[in-house]
Image: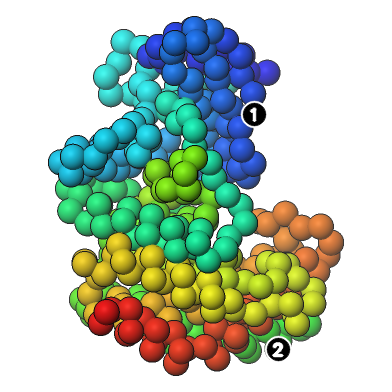
Amino acid sequence: MTNISHVFSQFDTRGTFGCAQPLGEGLINDTYLVRTAERCCCDYVLQRINTGIFSNVDMLQNNIMAVTRHIRHKLEAAGEHDIDRKVLTCVGLKNSDKTYYYDEASGAYWRMTVFIPGADSFNVVNRALSRDAGMAFGHFQEMLVDIQDTLYETIPNFHNIEFRLGQLREAVEEDKAGRVKGVRCELDAIEMRAAEMTISEQLHRDGKLPKRICHCDTKVNNVLFDNNGKVLCVIDLDTVMSSYVFSDYGDFLRTAANTGAEDDRNLDNVSFNMDIFHAFTEGYLKSAASFLLPVETDNLPHAAALFPYMQAVRFMTDYINGDTYYKTQYPQHNLVRTRAQLKLLTDVELHMPEMHDFITGVLIR
């Protein structure tokens, strides 16, 4: 069992270990809030990195250091105040100015950031939070447009739909769990859209669509707000890497604008909430329109469809493989998830003309 006090002592902190308690409800990493014994000193967030997902810890931390350093410089140049609450501050090891993680003898990897006091996050979205989240993630992308550091893929092909379709087709061919026969309808729905849904990869190969530095996990609880409800900063930077802006835009809407649950058995509950779309899009374009190309803004509705499609592909792949990746609560859980994502996708498709009109209206204001 890990001695949290011992791990804490490896980092170059102000103050000594007081106590530790679990922090947040993250599903990937184990996170603790560490209070220092000295009240005058700051507190810290200590996190054990899940190396089952992020196998190259050095690469992961180099990405995070490059991003936070660049954002800090941007905030300083803009004359921002209270910068330590508007960007994460990573803590290095003692007697080192370059190492920002601790490797336990047991093989566990730990990292530390300064705790931001008086900050809140939210799990439930509404119009106001969606608009603020849109502004936050758009501003995050905007600040990183000119970063000079090379960022690495912490999860290779994470949002590559051609890769995900390849995984599905391989699963269908192997049919390890003998489930393909019962899901022909869902597979047909996926395959009939495959050419349309892979246009981003083709546009990139044609030199028309750039990759930018994106967050790639744009949930509302990855934005911190102050006590007055104003955005402080974007957190959870493990998946920050090169991608299409569609990743941040579409992934937020897939979860936030779904009126049902991700695994809703009752498909009548599942639809695309246009109020959330309007709010998030307005906020996002307010921050990001200054650098987005027409090919990017023109295809934002495509991004809203791409991400439920991609998630349907991933759920279906896991179902056919025998439920080896996602945790399931019953034998057809991944199939139920697939159907819910396909229902969300069809509703997004119905709203495509309205989405295009709204985006055009926002851009010409």
Q: Earlier in the sequence, mark 1 or mark 2?
A: 1
Instruction: Read off the residue under disc 2.
Output: 185
Above or below, comparing residue 245 to residue 339 in the picture: above
Q: Is residue 74 left or right of residue 305?
A: left
Identify the amino acid type marked 2: Cys
In depth, the one of 113 and 187 nearer the eye is 113
In the rendering, at what x and y percent does residue 267 appear? Answer: 75, 80
Residue 309 in view (yes/no): no
Q: Is residue 282 left or right of residue 174?
A: left
Give residue 196's quadrant in the image: bottom left
Above or below, comparing residue 309 to residue 83 in the picture: below
Above or below, comparing residue 124 to residue 5 in the picture: below
Marks 1 and 2 sit apart, C-alpha to C-alpha, by 44 Å
Q: Residue at x 75, y 71 (%)?
A: 264
Q: Residue at x 22, y 75 (%)?
A: 293
In depth, the one of 113 and 130 nearer the eye is 130
Instruction: Read off the residue under disc 1.
Output: 22
Identify the amino acid type marked 1: Pro
Looking at this view, name the residue that lies furthest to the front: 228
Q: Is residue 265 left or right of residue 203?
A: right
Mark 1, secondary structure of its residue: strand
Q: Rate crowding at label 2 as few (under 14), some (14 to 19) or many (20 or more) other CA atoms within 10 Å.
A: few
Q: Residue at x 81, y 57 (%)?
A: 329
